[in-house]
Image (cartoon, rainbow, N blue to C red):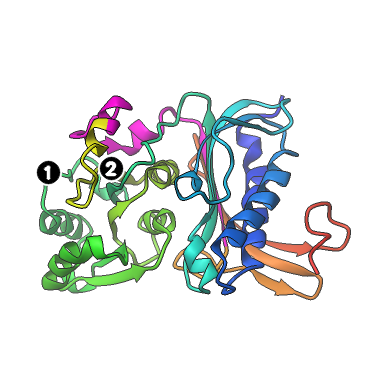
Amino acid sequence: MTSLRSLSPSLTRITTAGAVGAALHIGKGDPDKVDQTALDFSRAVLNQTEVDGEVICCEGPKDNAPAFSYKERVGTGNGPKVDFIIDQVDGTTATSKGKKDAISALCCAPSGCLKVLPDDGYYFKVATDGKAKGKINLDMSIEEIVQTIAKLKNRPLANFTVIMLERDRHNELLAKLRKMGVRIILIADGDIGGSIVTCLPDSGVDLLVGAGAGAEATIAAVAVKCLGGTMLVKVWKDKKDDAKRIDRLIAAGVDINKTYTENELAKGNEMIFAASGVTKGEMLDGVRFTAGGAIVQSICTRLPSGTLEWSTTNLKFGDHPIYKEIT
């Protein structure tokens, strides 16, 4: 039987397909077409993959956007029994507007190992490399978190870099960071990639902070855990939330006061993360179409080995069963 470890190349093919599908609609102003084509391409490749898989969460349903179905059975049914969380385009709006940092991403682990927080409002997230493991918590102020990590990295605040989504809900947080004098990278979409770059030694990015969706939190947690980093996630309580949100989260089994770590969102020591660039970003280059094909950059990391693989795929559409209809 196919081992989970040996699936890495197959999973990269899935995100490559999603990236190509999304990239066909870069800048055309139609986010649903971005999602739908990415979904069609990634589903087609996934269903050729030797796994007995189930999609336990995907991005899209809350916005009535194209997405995998909840508990959709995927794969040939002949490989290892695994759960998937798939975001065929993290950065759909960015892609439709021709902006940076969109990726196609997924994570995969044996059944029962991935915890997904409900797609109901936002969750506050902090991600950084392994130096801060056990040294920071979400009861600390943002100033304390930054200062602790900067000290652990022996980095002056003027050279410390924070990455975060550019959202109105982050205005107060952004003002505090600017007052500290740190460098800030604001991204239109894509806090999965933002989390991961904090764990890459040569990225120049030290910390991700901000509120985002629950599915992305688990996908990012898998990657961060594989890379030896640390991630903290907690329910974001916003004055704009509807009055019954907290009750819904409690009913769904969420501890609204708990800080979830990468080890609680991604249990065990066997898992894979894969992503491919759609538009150029901090982590990956975007899809480049060539005469009769495309060039796609991808990243894949896995446990237990902690292996990190970068790859560049030169696709030739021709008679390819997935891409042959592209003109």
Mark 1 crowdedness (10 Å alpha carbons): few <14, some 14-19, many ≥20: few
Question: Type of residue at label 1?
Answer: Asp
Find the distance from the CA under tag 2 to the CA under tag 1: 12 Å
The residue depicted at 74 percent of the width and 74 percent of the height is 290
Q: Quadrant of residue 319?
A: bottom right
Counting the numbered discs, the total is 2
Q: Say whether residue 177 is left or right of residue 315.
A: left
The residue depicted at 11 percent of the width and 55 percent of the height is 144
Q: Earlier in the sequence, mark 2 or mark 1?
A: 1
Q: Quadrant of residue 196?
A: bottom left
Q: Is residue 253 magenta?
A: yes
Residue pushed farthest right? 319
Q: Return the mark for residue 233.
A: 2
Instruction: Say which of 298 and 202 sits in front.
Output: 298
Q: Say whether residue 116 is left or right of residue 257.
A: right
Mark 2 crowdedness (10 Å alpha carbons): few <14, some 14-19, many ≥20: many
Residue at the spot of label 1 = 139
